[in-house]
Amino acid sequence: MPLPKLDNPAGDFWGGLAAMLVALPSAVAFGVTIYTPLGASHAAQGALGGILGVMALGLVAPALGGTNRLISAPCAPAAAVLSAFILEFLNGGGGLEPALLLLSMLGLLAGLLQIAFGLVRLGRLIEYMPYPVVSGYLSGVGLYIIGGQVPKFLGVPKDMHFWQALATPAAWQWQGMAVGAATIVVMLGAPRLTKRVPAAILGLLAGVITYFGLAQADPALLSLAGNALVVGPLSGGSGGGFTEAIAGRWQAMGGLGLEPLKQIAVPALTLAVLLSIDTLKTCVVLDALTRSRHNSNRELIGQGLGNIASALIGGIPGSGTMGATLVNISSGAASRLSGVVEGVLALLAFLALGSLIAWVPVAALAAILMVIGVRMIDKHSFHFLKQRSTVLDFAVIAAVVGTALTVSLIAASGVGIVLAVLLFIREQIGGAVVRRKTFGHQMFSKRVRTQEEMQILTERGDQAAILELQGSLFFGTANQLYVALEPELKSRAYVILDMRRVQTVDVTAAHMLEQVEDMLAERGGYLIFSQIPSHLPSGKDIQQYFDQVGLVRPESSVRVFGELDEALEWVEDRIIAEAALNLSEETPLSLRDIELFQGRKEETLADLERCMAQRSYKAGERVFARGDAGDEIYLIRRGAVRILLPIDDKQSHHLGTFGRGAFFGEMAFLDGDPRSADAVAFSDVECYVLSRQTFDAFADGHKRAALALMEGLASVLSSRLRYTNAELRVLES
Ligand SMILES: Nc1ncnc2c1ncn2[C@@H]1O[C@@H]2COP(=O)(O)O[C@H]2[C@H]1O
């Protein structure tokens, strides 16, 4: 394990000290809360367990966990789970000794589970637990803590619960309330006056001072015996010393069978999950504040070892806690050393002040916990109520809180996860899968068409519907897609689905598409897919998947194209062919029919034609390749030529298709550089070919015609550049 790098040891020391001061009072309070159900005489043992927890976690977790500046200490979720467990155990008739034993075992098992989480790399999963779940459980723990502390704050007898305590003012003890109130006021007000000393320490001091102030008037308060207002003296489980009690617990653990394991399995799992969430949530905040990057799985292992160490010495389990960590950072800590310093100082504080613990007023601890509980409630979640889109997220939080308070925290996590998954599905269902719907008379392929062809496409292009799809096509969205497709199935002959933004396709969606295909096929129509992503984020190959589910069969009316443009071109060709205009393509154009030369005198055209060669290419034949030398421009008399830009050995980008009357190869003709792209005959092609050299000779005698040709080229080039710019905009947007 590498030793931490020490950039700022002084900062680490002060950070560790400040963090210890923040962590200690709350750890003591958590310990007292967990142990009090066992009897007033155990409160001090709880307090000690809190301190030992700070110490063990401080020494072990940072040394092995590896997240710089993270402070680990007993935390509220641990207090909530363990006190709930103890209460349930005692209510179920469990005895004192077994309760103490199970408490240690719970911490031990939770630590082991955390190590297991880290080893099987669950860190990331836990870290990105759905927000409503985390928020709900934190608020639930907060409310749980408050509910447990209010009776203590009011000083009512032990068996009184929250509502009962509130409803029985006669049982309230004003002395404890005065101590608690002083603690709360100072804890809340102190940060305005000083940030040097942690507010909880000042609050605790205020509580202690108030207590001794009250004792001046009531000397009974100065005796520890039978005094329920203070933590009281330390007594081990069996009435002996603390060390013996712990050693006794180890021995007893060794003699246990599997039976108790069953009893603690669920609470230990809850504890492990909650402590892990708490830690990793703090790590995420820490990363954001210090621009660092933690290793969640390693941290979980460190935390697990820390909790095992804590359980072995009778400490309370804990996690990487937010409050102490933030104080640590702001006091200048730079490395993991600050965590270790915190652990050592906790030990020293215990040795120096341990005997004074007996005098800590219970109400002051209750007050500290109430403040912590209120802070844990995620007030931000109420903002979710303001917007319709997030009301359901709030409902999830409320359900998690409700379940945490009425059933259990683990049930609450389960409820939260199920609801969060449902919300996710709902969002997927709610999100539009059809990004845009256009028709063949609004959107055209890159193929340059003659005026007549364009006219046909504007008149009849609406036979094709083009739907750009996005997101997940699955059982939740299949119906939405079907509803969008249904009107088209009755009136269109071609339905193009642009799949480039689709992220998943499940069997339900594939089945629905099969039905769509059948309906189109009945009317002689086609279902066309373009740009099916070859690998989805899920790793699935949709094309293969479509083949497997039988959607794309050779005899089916489904066509698949690599790019939307190719699909559009295929559809356009068919629409034009149906309009019987393709027949006219059979006649090669003469020079005077080519737009570039329109308005020229017959003699000039005759001279020009003499300068030109005539070449023909079979469909699929290459006219030239990118990089070839050449200075000829090609004027297409018949057929079509595709211009392809090779990207790598396998792929090329389709720049455009030029048809009858259009020209290509003008770039090399103009600048003499090698060919900038491949040109391939798409159908049988006939063209006029004019080399630059011959053109220059021709230009000497026909200045005006030469100028007109150059102007024509320039204007077509500029329109191609405009087109390229438009495409660039789409790509960049
Ligand atoms: N972006 C483009 N859009 C349309 N046609 C192009 C584009 N880039 C190259 N071409 C054509 O492809 C031809 C390849 O050879 P040349 O460079 O001689 O001339 C080129 C143009 O005619």
Image: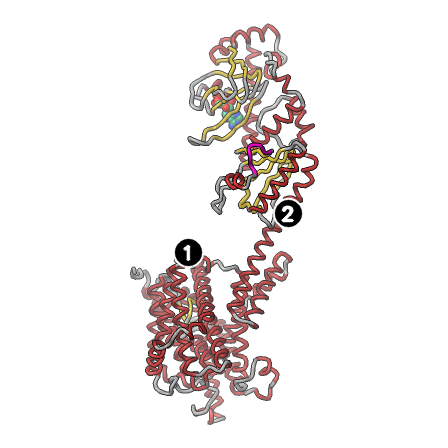
Ligand 1 closer than 8 Å to label 1 CB = no
Q: Where's the C terminus, which quadrant?
A: top right
Horizontal arrangement in the rendering, residue 476 relative to residue 32 (left or right): right
Give neighbour class at mark 2: few <14, some 14-19, many 20+ (Cα, 10 Å): some
Residue assigned mark 1 = 291
Q: Position of residue 127 (x, y in %)?
A: 46, 59
Vertical relation: 656 (above or below) 264: above
Most extreme residue toward the bottom, as rendered?
219
**Magenta span of residues:** 551-556
Task: Give the quadrant of residue 495.
Answer: top right
- In this view of the protein, which residue sits in the foreground, 408 or 174? 408
Task: Give the quadrant of residue 626.
Answer: top left
Q: Give the amino acid at mark 1.
A: Arg
Residue assigned mark 2 = 479
Q: Secondary structure at mark 1?
A: loop
Residue under the image location 29 percent in, 61 percent down = 3
Vertical relation: 86 (above or below) 724: below
